[in-house]
Amino acid sequence: MTSAAPGIAEIRSKIAAGERIGVEEARRLWFEAGDAEMRALASQVRARFHPQDRCTYLIMRIINYTNVCVAQCDYCAFYRLPGHAGGYVLSRETVFEKLDELLALGGDLAAFNGGFNPHLPLSYYCDLFAAIRERYGDRLEFYALTIAEFLYLADHAKLDYGEAAERFKKAGVRWITGGGSEILTEDFRARHSKFKYSVAEYFEAQRALIEAGVNTTATMVIGFDETIDERLEHLERTRRFQDETGGLKSFLCWTYKPYFTQLGGIEIGTAEYLRHLALARIYLDNIPRIRTSVLTQNERALEGLLYGADDFDLPIEDEVTQKAGATISLDFEKILAYARQLGFVPEYRHVQGAEKAPAGKPAAG
């Protein structure tokens, strides 16, 4: 291992002992530790939960059921305001066709992601998800919406978050993901998504879902204009929430695609993404599964397995990120071959009901 910058040796010893690092130590790692050091430290934490030569993956489809949205986030190239040309809502038959195609391609996980559509009542979603559960049973699982959409629907229906969670459970919903988090600081939301919900509201809704027995995840998007302090605040808030609830099954980070968006900007490189993935693996010592994003990093996302990630998905569609410049490959064998080339044995992971966390014990603290 290369020689460490002053202070890094102490952080390395702390991680080796299974101890938790704080925000200031994480900041020091980011600015002072080399890539090889970050990779080694993240791999140490990964080894607490997973065999070093194994990784898991999913084949999944993100179904963008509507593009009508009133949130007006400046980083989104997907949405259309109500009444504007190009707005749509998918028919139930089209949703079923997309799910059938997913199954035919060997996948069994769908995720629903749309927008804040004021014309769709809560009953639209409950009826749709109940119909999916009745038609497919446990042949596939689905992530019903994101936390952000859940917040909007609960408020639109004038329900508290616990009541809304129970409505979805009765409709056969088992999962609502942590999507819509982007960067969980109030300053970031004020700059880029002022009509979205506050950080406090985001976690309040996610807590209500966990208490209702609905599975959920943590997510993060980097590469806007956020500072390292904002990234660390997001990680700290996430870790603290997991300490309190224990309900986050995984953490997925992807990168902002700036093309055709109001915000614009320059896409960050894979090297920065991998360093952030390593920092997240080191810092989130109480979340067992760290996922790397093939959707936004393509094949090179699998290098994240060397930087602490243990899981990834092979997407067949996501209009939101594709509209902003993401490309999708259906050459699954080529992608899996790259995982093997990196020294990992990829194993397909089914998501049904409560996701089984891998063996491992989070660090105390």
Image: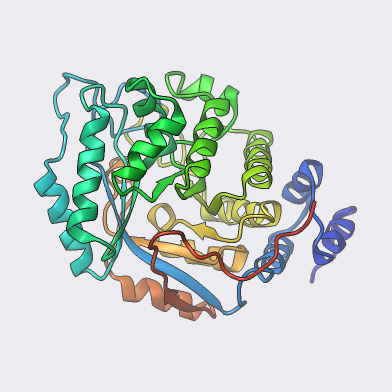
* Residue at 45% in and 77% down: 346
Q: Position of residue 333 (x, y in %)?
A: 33, 76
* Residue at 81% in and 47% down: 25
175 lies left or right of 191: left
3 lies left or right of 344: right
Q: Position of residue 121 (x, y in %)?
A: 24, 27
Q: Which quadrant of the figure contains the N terminus?
A: bottom right
Q: Position of residue 9 (x, y in %)?
A: 88, 60
Give the number of marks.
0
User: In the picture, residue 117 is in which quadrant?
Assistant: top left
* Residue at 62% in and 55% down: 287
18 lies left or right of 230: right
Q: Nearer the viewer, residue 221 or 103?
A: 103
Q: What scheme was used to colour the molecule?
A: rainbow
User: In the picture, residue 347 is in which quadrant?
Assistant: bottom left
Above or below 233: residue 196: above
Q: Position of residue 254 (x, y in %)?
A: 48, 49
Residue 158 in view, yes or no: yes
* Residue at 18% in and 49% down: 131
Q: Nearer the viewer, residue 33 or 42?
A: 42
User: In the picture, residue 37 is in which quadrant?
Assistant: bottom right
Above or below 166: residue 317: below
Q: Nearer the viewer, residue 248 or 317?
A: 248
Residue 264 in view, yes or no: no
101 lies left or right of 42: left
